[in-house]
Amino acid sequence: MNFKVILQEAEEGGFIVSCPALPGCHSQGDSMKEALENIKEAIEGCVQSLAEERAKLVAPV
């Protein structure tokens, strides 16, 4: 699964990265490479969390 991310230089140094398709999914890193690795982990966590929440909503009571 591919997601578009936005990578920006932070004023204090390093990089900030976010995933617009997943509100609240942000990360950072000292280098571009680190920031992109970190956002991959953040995206995986967000998607897993959303899947778990969805499973709770459709689970029989």
Image (cartoon, grey):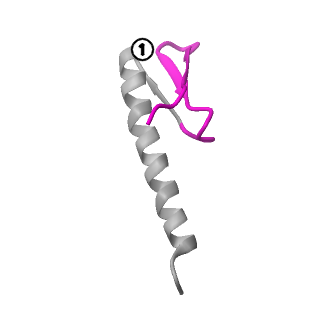
Q: Amino acid at mark 1?
A: Met
Q: Position of residue 16 (x, y in %)?
A: 53, 22
Q: Quadrant of residue 44?
A: top left
Question: Percent from the top left, x then y, of residue 14?
Answer: 46, 15
Total marks shown come to 1
Answer with the quarter of the image where residue 58 lies.
Answer: bottom right
Q: Position of residue 8 (x, y in %)?
A: 57, 15
Task: Give the side of residue 31 with respect to residue 26, left or right.
Answer: left
What is the quadrant of residue 42 in the picture? Answer: top left
- Is 9 included in the stretch rendered in magenta? yes
**Farthest residue in the bottom direction?**
61
Compared with 6, 42 (above or below) is below
Residue 15, visible in the rendered structure: yes
The residue pinned by badge 1 equals: 32
Q: From the image, which quarter does the N terminus lie in? A: top left
- Vertical comparison of 32 with 25: above or below: above
Q: Nearer the viewer, residue 25 or 28?
A: 25
Q: Residue at x 51, y 77 (%)?
A: 59
Quarter of the picture holding the C terminus: bottom right
Above/below status of 12 relative to 61: above
Does 19 lie within the magenta span?
yes
Q: Main secondary structure of the magenta part?
A: loop
Residue 31 appears in the picture as rendered: no
In this rendering, is residue 29 above or below 59? above
Task: Tell me: 23 left or right of 54.
Answer: right
Provide the residue span drawn in magenta: 1-25
Please name the residue shown 40% across and 17% down the image. 30
Q: Left or right: where does residue 20 sit relative to residue 51?
A: right
Q: Residues within 10 Å of mark 1 (few under 14, many from 20)?
A: some
Q: Which residue does the image show at 49% across and 47% down from the upper left?
A: 46
Please tell me which residue is depicted at 49% across the width and 12% down the height of the picture. 13
